[in-house]
Image (spheres, rainbow, N blue to C red):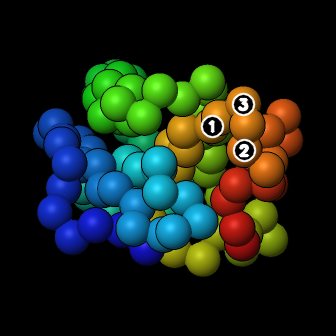
Amino acid sequence: MLTDAPLGGNRAFYMLGSIDPEMPHAVMIILRRHAEDPFDIWPEEWAELGEMLLKAKAHLASCNPDGFTLGWNVGAVAGQHVFHVHLHVVARFAGERNAGKGIRAVIRS
């Protein structure tokens, strides 16, 4: 579940915040043009993605995370349900239930 209003963006991507109570400190970075998966991102868009990752980190810094999980699901067999490029950025905390566990613990299929 995502917020309606973008939290930031650039020419290639925009960012939405989570309203999911299970992941309140998370955002998704979404490609503006249609492409199904990150293998279809153009070289110039990768630089723009780097900029958006820094914006996501800055946005989530207010909750003082101890780390981050970044995640892509590519293909139905990998759990992709929305066939449009989007990157999950999830703030992680030392005291959380799934601390020390990777992407499977925080991104539901």
Q: Which residue position holds label 3?
A: 94
Kind of residue indicated by mark 2: Glu
Q: Which mark is residue 76?
A: none
- Residue identified by numbered label 1: 92
CA distance for labels 1 and 2: 7 Å
Residue type at tag 1: Arg
Q: Residue 16, located in which quarter of the rendered image?
A: bottom left
Q: Residue at x 61, y 24 (%)?
A: 66
Direction from residue 81 to residue 82 in the image, left or right: left
Q: Are marks 1 and 2 in contact (CB under 8 Å)?
A: yes
Residue 39 percent coordinates (x, y)? 56, 45
Mark 1 element type? strand
Contact between marks 3 and 2 (CB within 8 A): the answer is yes
Badge 2 is on which residue?
96
Evaluate whether residue 85 shows in this view.
no
What is the C-alpha distance between the residues marked 3 and 1? 7 Å
Q: Residue furthest front?
A: 95
